[in-house]
């Protein structure tokens, strides 16, 4: 369970500019194994929120607790998937996937074993010794996802992970992500710009206001799990998308 | 630090402008081996140059431009008589020590300055100033510090390479994408792990470029230093033949010097190529 209580974050001004209030008192609770999407206009602090939960950034005010424990830094219970993949270009796929384990001091044979298992899980068989530059965007993100899953985290933090790939690949990755989570449930905090993606993937959608970011509304998605192939035909799917779009439009006025 | 950093800083100063091109030393495709066709062209160009030199030397009869045939004969003589061997060894000895120290020192300081802003700010004025200063200007100071002898020679070589290596290593560290560092952090990397597993490998392309530029500069320092300072070494030979207007011998030694410079650079380049194959700056 992730709890954010009164979280406030200001970025100091650079080169004489005034400081920026990125997050203004965010309160949020995320239940275990829940998939929560954070949706909002650009600059609303979505990524800041994610990094705070990851322990990469400290809060100025308020606190973040995971299962009751205060978050003071990064930890093995959380893994991160980056929008621009952040794969090490000098390492091959197996090494990249095993990177988190390597940092923990896991033995090489065990690392490789785990990496190979995940390569299968994300559908990258045959590409073990390839380098990131030899892979398409979608494949690179599969590596990113595998790397995050390799450390067996309780919480998956995803920062617009499918934002850098084309629409078709995006759809495939979404389906694969849901399938992976079905097999091995995790708490997921997923930042996105895409209304459709938010509704497709999550249990709840958190709408954030433009900067300074606050929680504007939280919407229960309530669509069946596992997601059916004909999700697009569900009336509720379209209704939710319409509602969220409306909210976003209203906020930007 | 920009996360969109696809080009690297120039090597003209410690905090060069963002977005300048990767450091260059030569005209040809230094990152690619020549194809068979290109190798033939290269050879042809050399032969043609040699032919022009021979004809010009014979036809013009300038005392300072001996035909290449005389030069090659003089070179053969020098090598056969063993004269050049002693000087060559002396030169290479100083080069090895001077460059070796510059590599150790330059890498260390470069890592420090690249990683820690306080170090960069504190040391930038000195590094930039000394980088652009002709090192021979410092010879009198070196003499008073080190006395007469080989030390001054080694110091000149060291200084020539040290600052270039520092600046490029620092640039290399800074060129590592912020997202890699963040990624390593989030997966639990400590500072030491960050250095070993992210910063050092990431810095390798520019660092290797610095080592390659450094060896070129070191060889130049070796020759110019020897011409002024020492009694043994290739530079000293150049001075001797130059003062006697022994142009064939002079050119012969010059060819050896060029040969040494080329071999050293090619050696470093080969390592560079191997080690940076993964990056867009390597081959």
Image (cartoon, grey):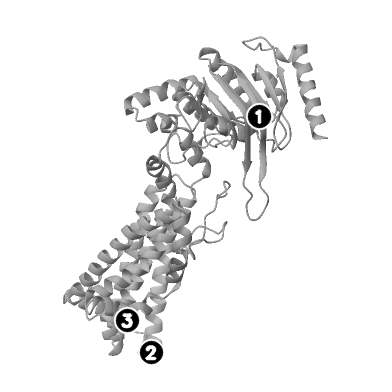
Residue ID for mark 1: A26
> Residue shown at 35%/90% (left/top)?
B63
Give x and y (percent) for residue B104. 31, 58
Examine the rendered structure and indicate whether residue B222 appears above or below residue B243: above
Give x and y (percent) for residue B8. 52, 55
Q: Are marks 3 and 1 on the same chain?
A: no
Q: Is residue B53 visible?
A: yes
Mark-to-mark CA distance, 2 and 3:
37 Å
Give x and y (percent) for residue A89. 47, 40
Compare residues B181 and A144 and report the one nearer the observer. B181
Residue ID for mark 2: B62
Mark-to-mark CA distance, 3 and 1:
66 Å
Examine the rendered structure and indicate whether residue B32 appears above or below residue A219: below
**Mark 1: few, some, or many residues within 10 Å (few <14, many ≥20)?**
some
Q: Is residue B29 visible?
A: no
Query: Mark 3–mark 1 contact, CB under 8 Å?
Result: no
Q: Nearer the viewer, mark 3 or mark 1?
A: 1
Q: Are marks 2 and 1 on the same chain?
A: no
Residue ID for mark 3: B140
The residue marked by circle 3 belongs to what chain? B
**Mark 3: few, some, or many residues within 10 Å (few <14, many ≥20)?**
few
Q: Secondary structure at mark 1?
A: strand
> In the picture provided, is B202 more to the left or to the right than A244?
left
Q: Secondary structure at mark 2?
A: loop
> In the picture provided, is B249 more to the left or to the right than A179?
left
Compare residues B53 and B9 and report the one nearer the observer. B9
Q: Earlier in the sequence, mark 2 or mark 3?
A: 2
Q: Secondary structure at mark 3?
A: helix
């Amino acid at each position: 369970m992730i709890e954010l209580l009164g979280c406030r974050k200001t970025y100091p001004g650079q080169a004489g500019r005034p400081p920026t209030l990125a997050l203004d008192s965010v309160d949020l609770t995320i239940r275990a194994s829940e998939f929560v999407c954070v949706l909002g206009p650009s600059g609303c602090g979505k990524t800041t929120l994610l990094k705070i939960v990851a322990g990469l950034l400290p809060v100025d005010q308020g606190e973040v607790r995971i299962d009751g424990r205060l978050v003071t830094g990064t930890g093995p219970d959380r893994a991160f998937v980056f929008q621009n993949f952040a794969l090490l270009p000098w390492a091959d796929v197996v090494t990249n996937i095993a990177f988190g384990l390597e940092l923990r001091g896991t033995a090489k044979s065990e690392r490789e074993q785990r990496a190979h298992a995940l390569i299968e899980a994300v559908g990258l068989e045959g590409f073990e010794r390839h380098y990131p530059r030899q892979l398409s965007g979608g494949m690179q993100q599969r590596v990113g996802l595998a790397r995050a899953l390799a450390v067996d985290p309780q919480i998956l933090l995803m920062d617009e992970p499918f934002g850098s790939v084309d629409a078709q690949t995006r759809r495939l990755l979404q389906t694969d992500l849901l399938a992976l989570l079905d097999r091995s449930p995790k708490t997921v905090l997923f930042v996105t710009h895409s209304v459709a993606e938010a509704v497709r993937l999550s249990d709840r959608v958190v709408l954030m206001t433009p900067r300074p970011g606050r929680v504007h509304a939280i919407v229960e998605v309530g669509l069946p799990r596992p997601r059916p192939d004909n999700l697009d035909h569900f009336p509720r799917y379209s209704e939710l998308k319409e509602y969220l779009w409306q909210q976003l439009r209203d906020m930007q006025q | 630090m920009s996360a969109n950093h696809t080009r690297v800083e120039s090597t003209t100063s410690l905090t060069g402008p963002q977005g300048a091109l990767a450091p260059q030393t030569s005209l040809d495709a230094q990152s690619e081996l020549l194809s068979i066709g290109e190798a033939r062209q290269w050879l042809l160009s050399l032969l043609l140059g040699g032919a022009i030199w021979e004809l010009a030397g014979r036809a013009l009869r300038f005392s300072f431009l001996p035909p290449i045939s005389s030069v090659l004969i003089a070179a053969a003589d020098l090598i056969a008589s063993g004269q050049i061997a002693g000087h060559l060894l002396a030169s290479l000895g100083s080069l090895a020590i001077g460059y070796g120290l510059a590599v150790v020192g330059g890498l260390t300081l470069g890592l420090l300055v690249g990683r820690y802003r306080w170090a960069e700010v504190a040391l930038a004025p000195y590094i930039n100033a000394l980088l652009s200063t002709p090192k021979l200007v410092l010879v009198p100071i070196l003499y008073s510090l080190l006395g007469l002898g080989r030390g001054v020679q080694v110091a000149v070589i060291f200084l020539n390479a040290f600052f270039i290596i520092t600046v490029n290593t620092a640039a290399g560290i800074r060129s590592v994408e912020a997202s890699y560092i963040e990624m390593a952090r989030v997966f639990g990397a400590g500072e030491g792990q960050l250095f070993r597993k992210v910063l050092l490998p990431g810095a390798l392309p520019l660092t290797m470029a610095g080592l390659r530029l450094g060896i070129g500069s070191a060889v130049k320092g070796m020759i110019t230093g020897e011409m002024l300072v020492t009694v043994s070494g290739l530079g000293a030979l150049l001075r001797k033949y130059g003062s006697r207007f022994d142009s064939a011998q002079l050119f012969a030694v010059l060819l050896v010097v060029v040969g040494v410079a080329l071999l050293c650079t090619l050696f470093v380049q080969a390592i560079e190529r191997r080690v940076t194959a993964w990056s867009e700056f390597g081959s």
